[in-house]
């Protein structure tokens, strides 16, 4: 028993909340800022106007990502809290039914009826609400919605991602802004896909191809629109 208590496992599911927000923010930062820069450059913008557009895109995008992530995850958190409150009320109103419900869940997972009742007895004696939240509602501390954490991770990662195309603009002559930003952004996207896959324990190939494809498509479409608008104007 002492060896089991000393053993600590680290599961990747605990990273779901912040990892999703961070990968989304960084990907959006690279793609949206690079696309904006390429679109302005394709419309025959000056070096200064391209840089200003990129900085404005970084600031606006980071604030938008933070606000959107906070609102979205807060809605999820509110739903989870409402379900837990409803479960708490049901436990007070009809504990016998809730006990039978919990035991039935364990039976469906392959536990014998007698043992399922014993497990339900012991878990409800320790923390009935936690047992029902975990096994009936599927809620746990590892996967619980954390709005502030998600908002901060999303805003910070967006800013880091958006800074990459901006740096490319600073170091590149005006005539080479488009190919430099496109190439650098593609490299950054591939790195992001690899880092995200590694952190989440997923395969590298599909993750890299996924972010690279959609990033290239976004930049190509924006460049085409910028070229058309620049020609028309």
Image (cartoon, rainbow, N blue to C red):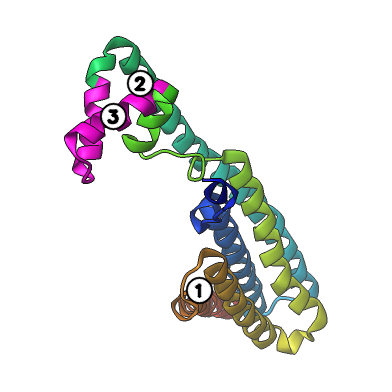
Vertical placement of residue 114 versus 44, above or below: above
Q: Which mark is in front, 2 or 1?
A: 2
Q: Quick one: quadrant of the C terminus?
A: bottom right
Query: Which mark is drawn over residue 118?
Result: 3
> From where the camera sits, is residue 226 visible?
no
For the residues marked 2 and 1, what is the alpha-carbon distance in whole angstroms? Answer: 40 Å
Q: Which residues are magenta?
A: 98-125
Position above or below: 201 against 83: below
Q: Residue at x 70, y 74 (%)?
A: 165
Rendered image: mark on residue 193: none
Q: In this image, 129 relative to 62: left or right?
A: left
Depth check: 103 or 3 in front? 3
Quadrant for residue 196, please give it. bottom right
Spatial separation of the CA atoms under disc 1 and disc 3? 49 Å
Q: Which mark is residue 211?
A: 1
> What residue did someone put label 2 on?
86
Dot in front, 3 or 2: 3
């Amino acid at each position: 028993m002492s060896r089991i208590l000393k053993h600590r496992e680290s599961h990747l599911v605990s990273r779901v909340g912040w990892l999703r927000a961070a990968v989304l923010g960084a990907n959006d930062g690279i793609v949206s800022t690079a696309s904006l820069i390429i679109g302005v450059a394709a419309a025959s913008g000056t070096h200064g106007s391209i840089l200003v557009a990129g900085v404005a895109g970084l600031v606006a995008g980071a604030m938008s990502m933070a606000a959107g992530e906070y609102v979205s995850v807060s809605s999820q958190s509110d739903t989870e809290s409402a379900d837990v409150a409803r479960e708490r009320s049901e436990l007070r109103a009809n504990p016998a039914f809730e006990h039978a419900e919990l035991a039935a869940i364990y039976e469906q997972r392959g536990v014998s009826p007698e043992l399922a009742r014993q497990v339900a007895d012991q878990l409800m004696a320790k923390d009935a609400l936690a047992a029902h939240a975990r096994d009936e509602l599927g809620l746990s501390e590892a996967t619980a919605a954390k709005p502030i954490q998600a908002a901060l991770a999303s805003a910070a990662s967006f800013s880091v991602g958006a800074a990459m195309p901006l740096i490319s603009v600073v170091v590149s002559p005006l005539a080479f802004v488009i190919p430099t930003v496109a190439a650098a952004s593609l490299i950054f996207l591939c790195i992001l896909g690899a880092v995200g896959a590694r952190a989440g324990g997923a395969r590298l190939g599909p993750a890299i191809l996924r972010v690279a494809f959609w990033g290239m498509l976004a930049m190509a479409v924006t460049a085409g629109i910028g070229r058309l608008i620049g020609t028309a104007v």
